[in-house]
Image (cartoon, rainbow, N blue to C red):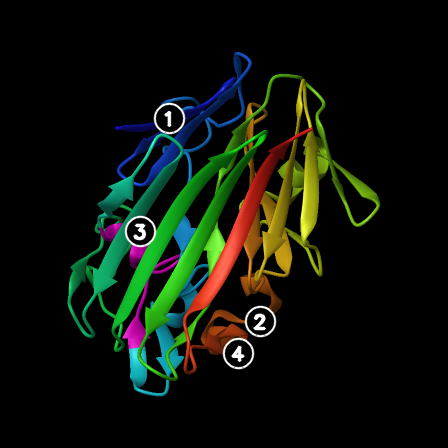
């Protein structure tokens, strides 16, 4: 367990997962064990979205890769690289074609093993600033490696009718619940605000879009994404890829208390 503390803010990180953001006694992050989702945050990489209708296969230039929903990164463990009172850096390293056991098998998936035909290093960094927690992601890998990236934080809800504001539009909790397991798309958006008992805004760099998901009234996931996976059939998921060229890719999410 790692804690970052700055004045009235405390961030709690468990094995690279953001499990708490407490500001002036108000908890912003969904608590593990509460109804809705067994996690508090996660990364969707190297794909976003389900793959069951495509026999758990995704097209790449190196052939078909076996991937379950949201990719295999979540099956890997983070290593803590460094930490200070206000920063923590975590890393995952994957060697091409290494077989990874799928934790969803056999209860929720028929894909027992997952693999990806490219090498990559994935670095997740937390930086606590005044009234802001910055979470950044640095991706390095084989030249030409295709990928999508999504960040999947869950926020605790304290009131019955919170609202989300994005692109000068208001989205209600009922709007998100109505979509069910298929997350609500918020396209072409880099800043979004959750207005609950307290307010928190997410400002992003690199992602370009959001999707919103919940199936319970006590939490909502506000997810920056590079591609909305339901825009295509699962067999065409590769159309949402971007690639690593000659330099690392960096994505950022700033969680700011209003």
Residue visible at 36% across and 87% down in the picture: 61
Q: Evaluate if marks 4 and 2 touch, with contact meaning CB atoms under 8 Å apart.
A: yes
Label 4 vs label 2: CA separation?
8 Å
Q: Secondary structure at mark 1?
A: loop
Describe the element under mark 4 as helix, strand or loop. helix
Circle 3 residues within 10 Å: few <14, some 14–19, many ≥20 = some
Q: Nearer the viewer, mark 4 or mark 3?
A: 3
The percent position of residue 229, horizontal first and vertical second, equals: 54, 63
Mark 2 or 3, closer to the camera:
3
Marks 2 and 1: CB-CB under 8 Å?
Answer: no
The disc placed on residue 74 is 3
- Does 131 appear above or below 191? above
- Magenta stretch, residue numbers: 65-76
Residue that carries the numbered disc 1 in the rendered image: 32
Q: Which residue has dot 2 on it? A: 232
Image point 23% across, 69% down: which residue?
A: 115
Q: Quadrant of the N terminus?
A: top left
C-alpha gap between disc 4 and disc 3:
22 Å
Q: CA distance from mark 3 to mark 1?
A: 16 Å
N-terminal label among 4 and 3: 3
Label 3's element? helix
Look at the numbered disc 2 and give the secondary structure of its residue. Answer: loop
- Magenta stretch: residue 80 in it? no
Quarter holding the C terminus? top right
Give whichever of discs 3 and 1 has the lower sequence position.
1
């Amino acid at each position: 367990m790692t804690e970052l503390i700055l004045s009235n803010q405390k961030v709690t990180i468990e094995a690279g997962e953001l499990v708490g953001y407490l500001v002036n006694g108000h908890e912003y992050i969904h608590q593990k064990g509460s109804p809705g989702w067994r996690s508090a945050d996660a990364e969707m990489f190297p794909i976003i979205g389900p793959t069951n209708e495509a026999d758990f296969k995704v097209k790449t230039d190196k052939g078909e890769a076996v991937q379950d929903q949201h990719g295999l990164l979540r099956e890997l463990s983070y290593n803590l690289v460094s930490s200070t009172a206000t920063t923590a850096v975590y890393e995952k390293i994957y060697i091409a074609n290494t077989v990874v056991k799928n934790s969803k098998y056999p209860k929720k998936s028929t894909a027992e093993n997952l693999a990806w035909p490219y090498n990559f290093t994935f670095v997740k960094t937390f930086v606590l600033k005044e009234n802001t927690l910055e979470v950044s992601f640095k991706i390095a890998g084989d030249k030409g490696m295709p990928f999508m990236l999504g960040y999947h934080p869950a926020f605790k809800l304290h009131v019955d009718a919170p609202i989300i504001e994005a692109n000068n539009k208001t989205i209600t909790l009922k709007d998100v619940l109505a979509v069910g397991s298929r997350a609500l798309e918020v396209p072409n958006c880099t800043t979004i605000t959750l207005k609950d008992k307290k307010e928190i805004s997410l400002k992003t760099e690199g992602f370009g879009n959001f999707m919103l998901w919940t199936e319970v009234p006590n939490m909502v996931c506000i997810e920056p994404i590079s591609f909305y996976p339901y825009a295509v059939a699962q067999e065409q998921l590769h159309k949402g890829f971007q690639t690593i060229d000659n330099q690392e890719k960096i994505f950022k999410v700033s969680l700011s208390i209003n």
